[in-house]
Amino acid sequence: MPAIFSRSLEGHARQAGVGLAVAVALVVTGWYYYAMPSYTRVGYTPEQPVPFSHELHAGNLGMDCAYCHQSVFESPHASVPSSQTCMNCHNPKKANVKGNSPLLAPVRTSFDTGRPVEWKKVHKLPEYSYFNHAVHVNKGVSCVSCHGQVNEMVVVRHDKPLTMGWCLQCHADPHTHLRDVKDVTNLKWKPESGKTVSEVGAAIQKDLKVAPPMNCQGCHR
Amino acid sequence: MAADPRTHEAHTGSKFPDPLPRIPLVWGPADYDSVSAQISEITEKPQPYWWWPALLITSSLLCGGVLAATYLISTGVGVWGSNVPVAWAFDITNFVFWIGIGHAGTLISAILFLFRQKWRTSINRFSEAMTLFAVICAFIYPGIHVGRFWYVWFSIPLPNANHIWQNFRSPLLWDFFAISTYFTISLIFWYIGLLPDLGTLRDRAKSRTRQMIFGFLSLGWRGSTRHWRHYEVAYLMLAGLSTPLVLSVHSVVSFDFATSLIPGWHTTIFPPYFVAGAIFGGFAMVLQCMIPARAAYKLENVVTIKHIDVMCKFILATGTLVGYAYCMELFIAWFSGNPYEWQTFKNRAFDGDYTWAYWVMMTCNLFIPQVFWIRWCRQTPWFVLIIVTFVNVGMWYERFVIIVQSLHHDFLPGSWGQFHPTWVDWLQMIGDFGLFFTFTLLFIRLLPMVAIAEVKGVLPMANPPYSHLDEEAAGHPIPPSEFHPDESYLKGEDGEYPTPDHALAASYGLPSRPATEVKPSPEPVPAFIPNPGGTGKPWGVVAEFANGSDLLEAAKRALAAGYKHLDAWTPFYIHGMKEAIGRTRSRLPLFTLAGALTGLATAASLQFYLMAYYYPTIVGGKEYRSWEAFVPVLFEMTVLFAGFFTLFALIGLCGLPKFFHPLDSHPTFGRATQGGFFLTIEAADAKFNPDETRAFLESLGGKHVAVVEA
């Protein structure tokens, strides 16, 4: 009876086996890198209707975050400012800072008509997760912990993955992200010399009795 | 007649010889080649006239199931009749029903193997396949009943962006581990069992396609004793691993119910009761499929009346066990004085909406199988078929009663309710049967449905009494024996058949004696066989022998003559052959042990790390580190890893896959997987000399001796 397979087949079969194993390993590794929110969501930088620069306003001019996002200390939502807030400075009839800039035309239109500017939402949590801004900032979690160095962003980008696993890292170990409540909106804050972030955070955690929920219904109500 | 100390008569006056002549497991004049042909031809010849219509029917039913599942997934679980309070209904009933069916296969292949119940060889392949198909049918339900079935992967412990891990103290998770482990180990067991038979099919194949397919699937199995010695141990290891697995799977399934507080579920009798029920239902389903298949393919000499008889006894025993559990449940419900428990059982058995279902269950599972006390009922295939149909119906109703009846009345009368199945429920259930029987039909058609190699090993001609043949030839008669192939075959000393079974077995004809001559080669065997792309140097010398005993003798003499690189190639494992070629027991168990320890360590670290440190969760008010609830997953992962290590160790130690072998060019070597026995001495041997070694093998009585080019 003649042989069914040629003698080179075994070598090929072994090569194919190794190839398959490598391919599976690559797919799994690739999946865990490319299909995770840390890749798919981080870096999202949509073009906004108005080229508002956080670097200029919050960074160079040193405006407080809460000047625009004014309900952040009282409400679950940080609130996107209405064009009224912009017009405090940019109203051509009043302070007239760049009051006639064509770049601000959508803001002026919104102010005149009462229709909000259609900002693109960058940070979006799923509806089944209950997140309260006020609770976090009042316990000393800075804006920078979840939104990154916004004071350095010309266009706001999605800086952190905002996945549940990422939330839980801080919920399990909050002291790495806590500071005095008065410094929460100070995005350039550094601990006093001789202290680490952790030490400051640990003291704050004790003072403010920070005990983040680790149970499901803390966030999924 | 003088009192012979070997007979009962000496003690009791009975005329029966003691022991009774043992009835062989395969009846009639079967030999190695005829068994290979009989089983292989089912997959080789054109299918019988009923096969396509049958497949059409079952696949239509399957399409119905696919339709129902699609409708369910696209619309939502609301299309089923399950709702509060009966939140589990047809879905879990069918799930438990199929998981139960899946128990007979591995019981037959593993537990009966450990107990040396050799009759299992005729039915183990078929029932293992049924196990796999039944578990697939069952696995559909956990998949689709969760509603958003694309989130089913949440039940697998995979690292994920949410950092969510499973609750390892939940019986539902144990269930997931138990069933996936059971399926995997059963598949490995089944495939390892198939290897030699796939080799047989490959060597019988005429068409190139079949040769390629079976050549690939068999991984190049050629019946080498160096492989058999690992194979036998791997099989034993897997049997040892599967035995506790069979008992654990349905125990774990029963935990889904028993660990809850629902009256009617919260009982400690559930695990043994479920396991007994599973074996009961599993054997019934094996018979349900086996009896028609046996008749359709004329397998009566392999799957004999005695096989059916023994399986009926299993059904009788387990059915009675299950009946005992039914009665004990009822008694304890009353005896415990727990008003909720008694309310549920009173409602179940006497005055409730589902009392009819309870009595269907009692009748089919406890009362009807009692007919198997009667020999005629066990040995009449059409009658057995009717009874096992009742058993299958009864076992479905058992799950229905446990699940639906217990749920419809819980503690609060305000939350009582009824269950009404919808057409989707029915269609899904029918679709499951379609899936199961479609798989079964395809399996019968495509793969050997009887373990050919194992059956060869239990043929009368393969058995030890034939070692007496030499004594007989030397003038010493063999003692009256079941294997005495003459007119006294299976008879007592008085010349009568001791029981009707003996007469029935004898009516199939006398068993064949082992061949004494090597089958002639279809083409002349040259002294030197070249190989395509060969090196010009010899690989070794091969010789064919007429039967296993001759081969064993030749191998011993070759070893004694100083040859070291010996190998024997046989259609089934011959005991003593590995020693005859100078090999010892396989070291494969060490790999199994390593796998078991790896699995145990993995499961232990996974569970303790996740449940006690990574994400400490309080379950049932227990301490984070309380280990008791980790035991099921510890066990399942131990078995799973050990099974994988065993499979890979077998493949690795045997050096498989080996698609090309120099011996393939020998004109008759393909018979090593049919009925041929070959001895080879390799050129690597220090004592090897092409001419001398060939002459030596010829002097041992070898035929078709040839030097093969490497």
Image (spheres, coloured by chain):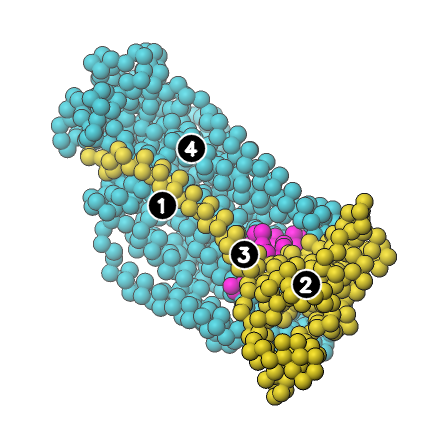
Chain colours: A yellow, B cyan
Task: Using the image, name the chain to which the residue with label 1 belongs.
Answer: B
Q: Which residue is nearer to you in this view: B454 or A51?
A: A51
Mark 4 or mark 1, which is nearer the start of the sequence?
1
- Which quadrant: the N terminus of chain B? top left
Task: Using the image, name the chain to which the residue with label 3 belongs.
Answer: A
* Disc 2 from disc 1: Cα separation: 83 Å
Q: Is residue B349 left or right of residue B315?
A: right
Residue labelled with disc 3: A39
Q: What residue range appears in magenta?
A: B149-175
Residue labelled with disc 2: A60
Q: Quadrant location of residue B524?
A: top left
Dot in front, 4 or 2: 2
Residue labelled with disc 1: B450
* Disc 4 from disc 2: Cα separation: 67 Å
- Residue extending farthest to the bottom is A113
Inspect the image, locate mark 1, and give the three-letter code of the amino acid beneath it.
Val
* Disc 2 from disc 3: Cα separation: 30 Å
Inspect the image, locate mark 2, and give the three-letter code of the amino acid beneath it.
Asn
